[in-house]
Amino acid sequence: MSSTIHFRIDEETKRLAMQAAERQQMSLTELMRQRAEELAAEERRRQNSEHESWLEVQIAQAFSRHDAGEGEYISNDEMENRMNALKQRATRGSR
């Protein structure tokens, strides 16, 4: 799915941007699309990096709890029961 972006710029900026696009043998629209895609890719990388950092903290905290003997160990059957209960609650939308 695609969408359209509209924005206003002054004539001088437009003229210079068009010249830059022509130098790259692209239309200004193509160049702006490319820049928007580059910005989106950069933002994706930043968000992924933030998530990875968060996940690393969560893992370190889990290992710290394990090392401190604070872990709770359950059987696979108990884990499946708990997960099924959580899934049912999520389906119902209850807390």
Image: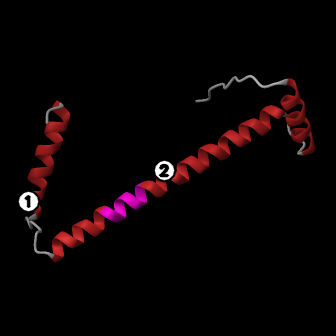
Residue ID for mark 2: 47
Left of 46 or right of it: where is 35? right
Q: Which mark is residue 77?
A: 1
Residue 12 position in % (x across, y down):
88, 29
Label 2 is placed on what type of residue? Gln
Vertically, is 10 above or below 24?
above
Quadrant where the C terminus lies? top left
Residue 77 horizontal side relative to residue 15, left or right: left
Q: Are marks 1 and 2 in contact (CB under 8 Å)?
A: no
Q: SS for tag 1?
A: helix
Element marked by disc 2:
helix
Q: Residues within 10 Å of mark 1 (few under 14, many from 20)?
A: few
Left or right? Give the position of 3 relative to 85. right
Q: Magenta segment range?
A: 51-57
Q: Residue 94: x percent and y percent?
A: 14, 33
Where is residue 8 shown, x and y percent of the image?
74, 22
